[in-house]
Image (tube, grey):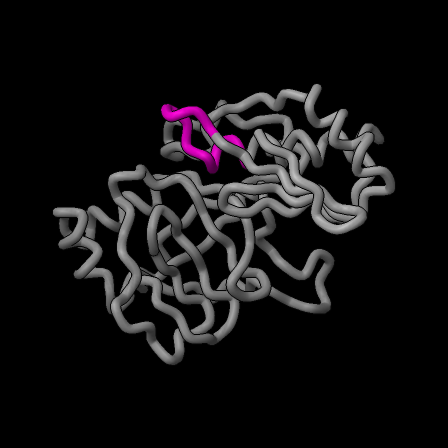
Amino acid sequence: MRIRPVGAHALLLDCTAPADMPEAELVEAWRAELWRRREHGDLIAVEIVPAARTVLLDGLPDPTTTARQLSRWAPAVAAATTHADANDEAKTQDDTDRGADVVVPVTFDGPDLPAVAEHWGVDAAAVRHRLTSTRFRVAFCGFAPGFPYLTGLPAELALPRLATPRPRVPAGSVALAGPYAGIYPGASPGGWQLVGRTDLVLFDVTADPPARLGPGRTVRMVAA
């Protein structure tokens, strides 16, 4: 892991995983460890923000001291997501602290569902089964407020984005791109492949927190 200063009060952790470990697992392990240490008073940080390969710590009173601490800490790395039917007994303490899985009812009628099925070499029913039998985890949020990047699908099922993005994707659209699943919290342009839709509200500025699916949350889709 490489630790880099960012401005006067922040550090960026570059999480370089071994060849046999997905980087998402190492990022998730560091996120969980840093949140745990902050809750226990071992770390003072205003923001801990995971991304695809990095974790940003912002609002540090003494970045130099924090960097030395980080070099001594070693998070426990475990698979972040698996099939739901095989992982009921494998919840981490972080899962328990954050509550039960968020259940997302999905109507699987997206316009790109046939294309995804063809890309995977299966039929539409098998795509639905794969998505509803996977226990996803929110790796990070981005693109739009409350947009969750969900890990859990096998690397070989990664999908290309659309060659031409849609000018408007409806709110609640359930989509796939690269190694991730995602759900559009609001209407916006987008190039992900749409496989379904949900009525679940993912972002509400009056809620605390505003994003229903924040980093570390586990998610299960169910057919509506």
Query: Is 48 colored magenta in this rendering?
Result: no
Name the image quarter holding residue 170: bottom left
Apparent side of residue 55 relative to residue 151 in the rendered image (left or right): right
| Residue in view at x 63 percent, y 26 percent | 93
The one nearer the camera, 180 or 72, is 72
| Residue in view at x 70 percent, y 42 percent | 5
Give percent across and percent down for residue 135: 42, 39
**Figure label count:** 0
Image quarter where the N terminus lies is top right
Give percent across and percent down for residue 156: 25, 39
Name the image quarter holding residue 107: bottom left
The one nearer the camera, 117 or 61, is 61
Query: Is 26 colored magenta in this rendering?
Result: yes
Region of the chain picked out in magenta, as a range: 17-27
The one nearer the camera, 51 or 132, is 51
Image quarter where the C terminus lies is bottom left
In the displayed structure, 45 sits above or below 175; it is above
Q: Residue furthest right?
A: 61
In the displayed structure, 200 sits above or below 152; it is below
| Residue 46 in view (yes/no) | no
Give percent across and percent down for residue 104: 46, 53
| Residue 173 in view (yes/no) | yes
Give percent across and percent down for residue 85: 37, 31
The one nearer the camera, 118 or 97, is 118
| Residue in view at x 38 percent, y 26 percent | 19
